[in-house]
Image (cartoon, rainbow, N blue to C red):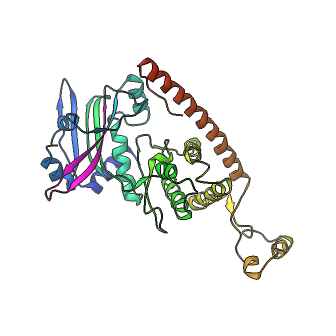
Amino acid sequence: MTVRERKSAVNDAQHIVSHPHADARTGAVCLTIAQNWRDVLALNGWQTLDDLFALTNDRSLAKPGLPRWRERLRTVLTDASGRKIAVYVKRFRDVPLSQQIKRCMAGEPHHGTAWTEWTWLGELARAGISAAEPIAYGEVMLGCWERRSVVVMGAVEGISLERWCARHERSLPAAVAEALADLVARFHALGIAHRDLYLAHVFGAALETSAPRLSIIDLQRVVRVGRRRRWIVKDLAALNYSTPPTAARPRERLRWLKRYLHLCGKRGLRNDTEGETSGSRDAAQTEVRGPSAVRNRPRAPRLRRRDRVLMRRIVGKTEQVRRHDARRKRRLAEVQATGTQRYEEDA
């Protein structure tokens, strides 16, 4: 899907209204608001792009290592009935040249950094994948140069799986693990990669029930992968690294990978009986010992050679992520000791 098609699809799905205008000195200014949020934002005084950048008394979500040109806020809106609604704001200004070049090379030369998250929120909603609700997007562009941009999103329900694992030193419930495999498989089936897919970016509700609800957040770095699978491996390695040993044992991780591959429709995953015509193989399967119920139970899917290669790549990338995270923590310690700050590149 081209950039023009993505923009048209988002507009159709969200019923948005836009307020663009241009200034020869500051550049083209555009503010896009989802139709069902227009009255709520107006009630709270959010009617212009300057209003969104003027927010100062809200809860900052800054963290060590976050570059100065990126800003995250959590604020609360009040609707006409007096109900409080939590929303999140991501703002980008004074974007450095290196990031401007990356954005242009990624195929978004005429839109700001926040545009990526805005468009993918709409695409995931159409695909039936739970994510934050897109509320508003604004940008100031001077040609291909981004002066500033902002995106406003609704809150997702529940807590992050990272926080759940920290509170419960036991394995993830089987229903949650299955739901996570389903979520990631459906996400990757769209031909995209998250590039920051840690448990901290997967939120869940009703986690102790048989029907947990999972959502994915932080879509700022999402890219289409095409035939390049390295970012898919990075996503799976990030999940593997961020899952503590208490939350999943090696056998449970392997079971999760098999389910993920099966849901993705990978051809490398098969049952023992699929495509087999050899009588010796059929005879070998009848030699399983135990009660008839156990003997006749379908075996779990097995990994073929190509899938074992993928598994080794995930393990290798997990080690790279671990080393990168260790270096990042050392750099953050140096930053805190010296009082300086610099941009942290992702693995």
User: Looking at the picture, how far across and down is residue 125, in whole percent?
Assistant: 37, 56
Q: Is residue 69 left or right of residue 264?
A: left
Going 44% across and 26% down the picture, which residue do you hit? 343
The quarter of the displayed image where residue 206 is located: bottom left
Q: Is residue 84 magenta?
A: yes
Going 57% across and 42% down the picture, which residue do you hit? 234
- Can the viewer see residue 192? no
User: Looking at the picture, how far across and down is residue 33, in whole percent?
Assistant: 22, 48
Q: Name the foreground residue: 121 vs 159.
A: 159
Q: Name the foreground residue: 112 vs 48.
A: 48
Q: Is residue 317 left or right of residue 68?
A: right
Q: Is residue 214 magenta?
A: no
User: Looking at the picture, how far across and down is residue 256, in whole percent?
Assistant: 61, 57
| On-image quarter of the C terminus | top right
User: Looking at the picture, how far across and down is residue 70, in whole percent?
Assistant: 35, 32
Going 47% across and 28% down the picture, which residue do you hit? 344
Which secondary structure type mostly characterizes the magenta part of the structure? strand
Q: Which residues are magenta?
A: 73-93
The quarter of the displayed image where residue 228 is located: top right
